[in-house]
Image (cartoon, rainbow, N blue to C red):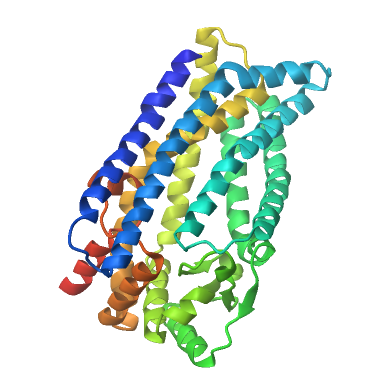
C-alpha cells in the first residue's frame, strides 16, 4: 500500500504544506509594510496570529500524514486482526472496526484541538473554559457516535446487499445531510449554545422589514451567546425550509451599529436571493456523487488488480481517510464560485442600507476579528471562500 501513501503525500500533504509556507512567507513580508485597514498594533497582532496559524497548520499536516501512513501500514490491519479474535458476525465486526477507527482518530486529534484553543486564548480570541470544552467534546462525541453509527451501518448494509451500493449510498448520505441542515438550528445548535429572541424591537422590526422585501420567511430572530466561547463577531441565516432562523452573535450587537447590522444581514440575504444556498447544495451533491462513484467503480477494481483483500469495514475506513484528498482537489472550484457570490451579495446588502454602512461594518469586523488583510494569491485561490477584504472594499468603492 506504499503507492497509496505516496499518492496521499503528493496530492494532499505536500501541496498543503507548500501553500502554508507560501502564506507564512507572504504574511511575514507584508507584516513589515505600512499597516492598512487595521491600526498599527492590531495589524501587528493580526500578522502574528496569521503566522502562528500557518505554523500550526504545517505541523498539523505533517502529523496527519504520519497518522494516515500508520493507519495504512499497520492500524487498519491491526484492528481487523483484533476484532477477528472475537469471532463476531461479519457485519457487526465491520461496524465496530469503523467506529473504533473514528474514536481513535478523535483521540489522536484532541491534543491539536487543545493547542488551537490555547493559541486563540494567547491572542485574546478564545473565552472557552475547560468545563465548556469538556462538555462540548462529550456532546459532540455522543452526537457523532449516534449519527455516525447509523450512517455506517446503513452503508455497510448497502454494500452487503446491493451491487450499486455506491449510488444508493450517495442518495442516503445526501438526504441525511439535508435533514441535518434542517434540524441543526432547532435541535442540534441549542445543545451547545443558548438562543434567546432578539429583544431590541427597533432592530427586530428593521430585520423583519428586510426579510419581507426579499420574501425570506424565518422562524425567528435570535441572539446566540457566542461570547462564552469566542470574542469574534458574526451573524448568519441558518436552516432550511420552516426551520430557517436569523442568528446574531451577542458580540456583534455590542460592536456594530444598527445600520451596519442591516447591511451585513442584507449581504446574507443576498445569498438567499441569488439562490447561492441551493447552488452550494448542488455543488455538495456533485462532490458527494463523485466520491461515491470513485469508491464504487474504481477502488474495488483496483483492489482486485493489485491482489488486495479488503473487508467492508477497512474499505469504509480507507474511504474516510481519502475524503480530505478529494475535498482539497475540489476546493479551488468551490472557493472560486463562493468568492464570486460574495461580491454580488455585498452589492445586494449595500442596497438595503448604504455602501458606506457595509464598508464600515466590514472594516469593523476585520478590526474586531483581527484578520490580517493580506494573503498569498495561491492561498486565496485554494482556501478563500470570501474575497480578500481589500478587494471587497475596492469593489464597494467602484460601484
- Give the x, y percent position of residue 9: 41, 25
Can residue 36 be seen here? The reply is: yes
Residue at x 40%, y 31% (from the top left corner):
12
Look at the image and tell me in which quarter the C terminus lies: bottom left
Of residues 376 and 168, the one nearer the viewer is: 376
Q: Quadrant of residue 331?
A: top left
The residue shown at (51%, 58%) is 121
Seen in the image, is 73 located left or right of residue 35? right
Residue 32 lies left or right of residue 42; in this view the side is left
- In the image, residue 212 lies at what x, y percent? 46, 83
217 sits to left or right of 196: left
Rendered residue at 62%/30% (across/down): 165
The one nearer the camera, 57 or 196, is 57
Q: In which image quadrant can residue 132 be found?
A: bottom right
Which is more toward the observer, 310 or 23?
23
Q: Is residue 164 visible?
A: no
Q: Which quadrant of the figure has residue 350?
A: bottom left
Q: Residue furthest top?
A: 307
Q: Answer above or below: position of 383 versus 234.
A: above
Q: Is residue 308 above or below residue 52?
A: above
| Image coordinates for residue 57, horizontal then vertical, percent | 42, 42
Q: Nearer the viewer, residue 115 or 193?
A: 115
Q: How many marks?
A: 0
Coordinates of residue 294 in the picture (x, y in percent): 48, 28
Residue beneath the point at 56% across and 34% down: 167
Amino acid at each position: 500500500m506504499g503507492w497509496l501513501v505516496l499518492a496521499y503525500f503528493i496530492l494532499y500533504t505536500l501541496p498543503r504544506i507548500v501553500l502554508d509556507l507560501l502564506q507564512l512567507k507572504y504574511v511575514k513580508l507584508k507584516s513589515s509594510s505600512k499597516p492598512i485597514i487595521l491600526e498599527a498594533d492590531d495589524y501587528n497582532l493580526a500578522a502574528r496570529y496569521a503566522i502562528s496559524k500557518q505554523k500550526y497548520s504545517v505541523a498539523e499536516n505533517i502529523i496527519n500524514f504520519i497518522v494516515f501512513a500508520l493507519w495504512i501500514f499497520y492500524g487498519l490491519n491491526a484492528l481487523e486482526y483484533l476484532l477477528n479474535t472475537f469471532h463476531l458476525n461479519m457485519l457487526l465486526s465491520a461496524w465496530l472496526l469503523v467506529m473504533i477507527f473514528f474514536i481513535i482518530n478523535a483521540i489522536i486529534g484532541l491534543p491539536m484541538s487543545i493547542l488551537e484553543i490555547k493559541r486563540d486564548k494567547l491572542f485574546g480570541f478564545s473565552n472557552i473554559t475547560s468545563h465548556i470544552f469538556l462538555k462540548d467534546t462529550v456532546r459532540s462525541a455522543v452526537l457523532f457516535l449516534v449519527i455516525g453509527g447509523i450512517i455506517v451501518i446503513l452503508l455497510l448494509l448497502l454494500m452487503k446487499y446491493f451491487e450499486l451500493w455506491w449510488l444508493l449510498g450517495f442518495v442516503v448520505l445526501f438526504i441525511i445531510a439535508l435533514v441535518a441542515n434542517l434540524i441543526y438550528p432547532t435541535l442540534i445548535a441549542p445543545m451547545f449554545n443558548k438562543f434567546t429572541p432578539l429583544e431590541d424591537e427597533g432592530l427586530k422590526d428593521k430585520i423583519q422589514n428586510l426579510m419581507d422585501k426579499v420574501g425570506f420567511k424565518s422562524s425567528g430572530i435570535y441572539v446566540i451567546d457566542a461570547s462564552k466561547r469566542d470574542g469574534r463577531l458574526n451573524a448568519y441565516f441558518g436552516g432550511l425550509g420552516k426551520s430557517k432562523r436569523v442568528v446574531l452573535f451577542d458580540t456583534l450587537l455590542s460592536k456594530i451599529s444598527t445600520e451596519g447590522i442591516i447591511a451585513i444581514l442584507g449581504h446574507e440575504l443576498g445569498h438567499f436571493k441569488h439562490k447561492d444556498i441551493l447552488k452550494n447544495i448542488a455543488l455538495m451533491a456533485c462532490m458527494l456523487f463523485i466520491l461515491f462513484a470513485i469508491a464504487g467503480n474504481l477502488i474495488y477494481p483496483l483492489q482486485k488488480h493489485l491482489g488486495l483483500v479488503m473487508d467492508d469495514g477497512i474499505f469504509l475506513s480507507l474511504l474516510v481517510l481519502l475524503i480530505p484528498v478529494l475535498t482539497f482537489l475540489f476546493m479551488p472550484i468551490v472557493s472560486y464560485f463562493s468568492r464570486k457570490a460574495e461580491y454580488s451579495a455585498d452589492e445586494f446588502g449595500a442596497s438595503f442600507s448604504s455602501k458606506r454602512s457595509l464598508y464600515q461594518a466590514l472594516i469593523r469586523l476585520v478590526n474586531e476579528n483581527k484578520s490580517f488583510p493580506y494573503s498569498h494569491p495561491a492561498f486565496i485561490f485554494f482556501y478563500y471562500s470570501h474575497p480578500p477584504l481589500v478587494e471587497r472594499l475596492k469593489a464597494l468603492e467602484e460601484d
